[in-house]
Amino acid sequence: MTMIELRAPELQFLAAAVRAALGTADRGTWPRDLDANTLVAAAEQHGAIVLLDRVLRSSGAPDDVVTRVRTLARSQTERTLVLTRQLRVLLDLFETHGITALPVKGPVLAATAYGHVGMRGASGDLDLILRAADLDRAVAILGDAGYQRVEPAIDEHDHERWESEAHLLPATAAQGTLVELHTELIGNFYTAPVDLEAVLARCEPRPLFGRAVPVIAAEDLLLYLCLHGARHMWSRLLWTIDLAALLRAHPAFDWDALVERATAIDARHRVALGLHLAAELFDAPVPADVRRCLSSSPRRLARAAALAVQRMDAASRGEHAPGLIARLRCELAVRETHDQRATYLHRQLAPNARDRAWLRLPRGLGWLHWMLRPIRLATRYGGRGHEHAPPRSTRISLAVVIPTYRRTEALRRLLASIEAQTVTPSEVLVVDQNAPGFLDDVLRETRVRLTRVMLDQPNAAAARNAGFLRATSTHVLFLDDDEVIGPEFVAQMLDAFRRHPQVRCLWPIVHFPGKREAALHAWQRFHRRGRAIAGSSIFPVNRAGSGGVAFEREYFRKSGGYDDLLFAFGHMAEDWELSTRMRARGMTIWSDASLFIEHTPTYDGGCAIRTAPYEEIRRASARACMFRQRIAAAPPFRLRLRDLVPIARFSLLSSMGRADARRAVLRHPLWHLRMIADARSESRELLARHGARYSDAARVDHLTHADVGVVAEERAKAAV
């Protein structure tokens, strides 16, 4: 069998550290030329930070690296304890209602394979297996307990047919993580389901977490882990480490039973691949005759293993999704038979519920979705280049930037919600665009330690840029002064950034009071742009708003910041323009279905768009759209035929939240046409004066041109 080896030196050291932690190799020494940032980022990405911590000090690593890893490992252990408590509550809850729930992965896997619940690190979710007849009742029980049902994380599933699972989120991150309820142990479109009743009959109750917990048989668990790893193309080392730890914990493993069950569902190749990776990378005790028995083609197995190693290396560099061709090669490499490969291709090319929601066609034209589906696949996986997350510092800090203008009570509510956070932001910057003294009483009352930055001219885009330039934290959260965040918000956002290095721009679900579910549905339907991060509630979206969006510091700098000229000209649409620019630069915007911001519209203050006369609002909308379309066109800033659609939409068709907007267009068509003509000439004149800033669309940077207008700054000192 061909030997496999990880390519990156950081991954090689990480694999050696894992072998030492598992007791299969001696502890190595710290190489002098090793990049500590890359190593720590890779250990986080691959779920091996706890195992790395166990052997790092004895390897001669620098003290600062040891401290960073120990801090992360401690955080992982604390999170694991939260998940363990959550799992115990769920098992007690289901047992009270007479429902048998079989936990897999998570704390139970850590306890049975690693010998201690804190050895594996925190899981991204909790998986429970139920009988199909109990699924609806279990969902209702969790709903009564405060959980909220969300869409499955893997969006290739046709949700109109996929009825064997449910995904539910607790109310806050402090209560745990995403719960996945399944009615099949190994169920997908490419493998026959395992007999669940037989799996339940082979379970044994074991004393864990202060109660008897049903534990899946080692042979069934290994089969599940192999198919789960193959499903995700073995992109994380953790899934291979699990196999090695499980086999070392069960020296009397029944190999004949494993081969028989893998053969029954046509999964011998996937099991052989998982065992091959575990044996070669982490010295898992796999008998040679078993490996020969499971693998009918050593060359095919070696090719699949090489592709898996490529995915591991790519994941450590921060690639969040492979390209279309790479994905196709990996998926076909792990398929068992020609029928499975044909089924996979058919499923990928067949339109699903998301395609139908993306473009609703009249009855009789549904066949067009078969032609559009390949275009969507190419756009999602092949239309944009890979985005690499740079090595991330293990210490993540958050600055909150709040532009405010002519609002006091709304700002008091927001500052009170920041004061109530379980994790205090590193910085809070209030960008004051008011007359001197307007906010003195509000800032004097708050106990939040903040920095006050004053601007001489109100401009929301310039205020955000100014707050960013004053902040020093690794991440920046922009909040509008009429928003409110829950007490776990900062902790949950930091956890999302820490656990998912590829997430560098995060826009939570912003909702009106009492409209959380409606906002979540709208986000999933209208903003979603691709598949979610497996095992999480984080999914890519097509745009980011102005208030409530968070950036990694260097990522926001790469975006070029908010366009202060656009806001000064049109008083709106700076967030749309920023999102369009980010997409053009291959940057990804994410959202989190478990992270919410309440937006309470305040009609006093702000940019006064809500209370201004209709003519002023419509004129601002037309000016903003006209200017945005011109700068997106690049020099010579000429409007194109396709720009007529958005111009007509914003200048004539949009309601702007006013019941009289469309009727006004019908009553005064000549005024609206003259307004559009004026906006066209005014936008052209503005670009004639400032065209140099937009001369190179790929390098537009409003942060370097920022005239922040800072006239004073003071620091309000108070006990937090």
Image (cartoon, rainbow, N blue to C red):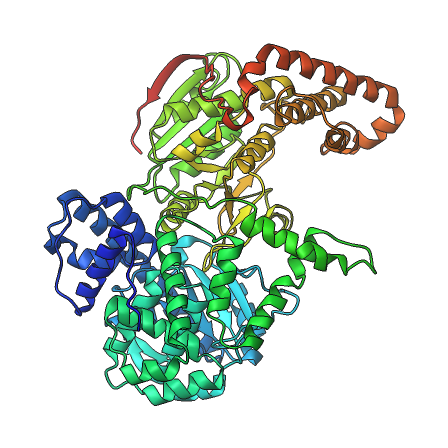
Above or below, 157 against 533 in this view is below
Using the image as rendered, state which of residue 411 and residue 624 is in the foreground: 624
Rendered location of residue 348, percent (x, y): 60, 63
Rendered location of residue 522, percent (x, y): 63, 48
- Horizontal side of 240 relative to 359 (left or right) equals left
Residue at (19, 45) in percent of width and height = 65
Quadrant location of the N terminus? Answer: bottom left
How many dots with numbers?
0
Using the image as rendered, state which of residue 326 and residue 679 is in the foreground: 326
Residue at (73, 27) in percent of width and height = 640
Residue 388 quadrant:
top left
Using the image as rendered, state which of residue 80 and residue 591 is in the foreground: 591
- Horizontal side of 654 relative to 609 (left or right) equals right
Rendered location of residue 281, percent (x, y): 27, 66
Residue 343 visible from this viewpoint: yes
Residue at (62, 15) in percent of width and height = 687
Rendered location of residue 417, percent (x, y): 44, 38
Above or below, 509 against 438 in this view is below
Quadrant location of the C terminus? Answer: top left
Residue at (50, 70) in percent of width and height = 181
Using the image as rendered, state which of residue 298 and residue 130 is in the foreground: 298
Above or below, 511 against 289 in this view is above
Q: Residue furthest right?
A: 667
Residue 91 visible from this viewpoint: no
